[in-house]
Image (cartoon, grey):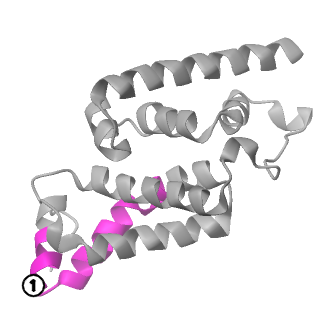
Amino acid sequence: MQVGPLKDSELVEYVKKKSAGWEEALSEIMKRYKNSLYAFIYSLLRDKHLSEDKLQETFIKFYIAIQSFDSSKKISTWLFKISHNLCIDYFRKKKEYASEDSTVFEKSDSDRDSTAEEVRFVIEKLDLESRSMLLLRDALGFDYEEISKIMGIPLGTVKSRISRSRNKFKELWISLMAEK
């Protein structure tokens, strides 16, 4: 079975029906989304091993619940919602939030010589919600409606939170530039 050219919805149907080649279909779904999901999870959790665990959990939950997935919907939205919820659950269980995490790395001045590093540095300083909003919209390119579904909040709330998050980013960016 040639899974590469198949659409996500077709792959999901193979997995749902356990048709011949369903393992390859599941593997292809994982291959398509593992990098972007890992990047998203890591940006929230800031821990390589924990992020790898949450990535695995995302795919396990996806597989367990695949029968309830509506193939007419975007698989990426569902996968990112699962991973986001796993991260939120982690923080709830730990009763800590990324913005209060004392293990957040501090970059030295020599590490901040590129714009990309400076952007990462500022994003690391944002609270979990702001970081999630900006990453989903600006880094991963989800539209407002998809973010609404991933985050489980109304569309208008998404727009205002993204605006607020961008303003926070801008304030932190200006502060960082003033230090230089």
Q: Quadrant of the C terminus?
A: top right
Q: Residue at x 59, y 55 (%)?
A: 42
Direction from residue 86 to residue 111 in the image, left or right: right
| Residue 76 visible in rendering | yes
* Label 1 sits on residue: 19
Q: Residue at x 73, y 35 (%)?
A: 121
Q: Secondary structure at mark 1?
A: loop
Height in image: 127 above or below 166? below
Q: Position of residue 133 (x, y in %)?
A: 47, 34
The image quadrant that residue 179 belongs to is top right
Direction from residue 7 to residue 169 in the image, left or right: right
The image quadrant that residue 66 belongs to is bottom left
Magenta span includes 93 = no
Q: Position of residue 9 (x, y in %)?
A: 13, 60
Q: Position of residue 177 (x, y in %)?
A: 79, 15
Magenta span includes 31 = yes
- Which residues lie in the magenta part? 12-38
Most common SS among magenta residues = helix
Say which of 155 and 117 sits in front. Answer: 155
| Residue 180 visible in rendering | no
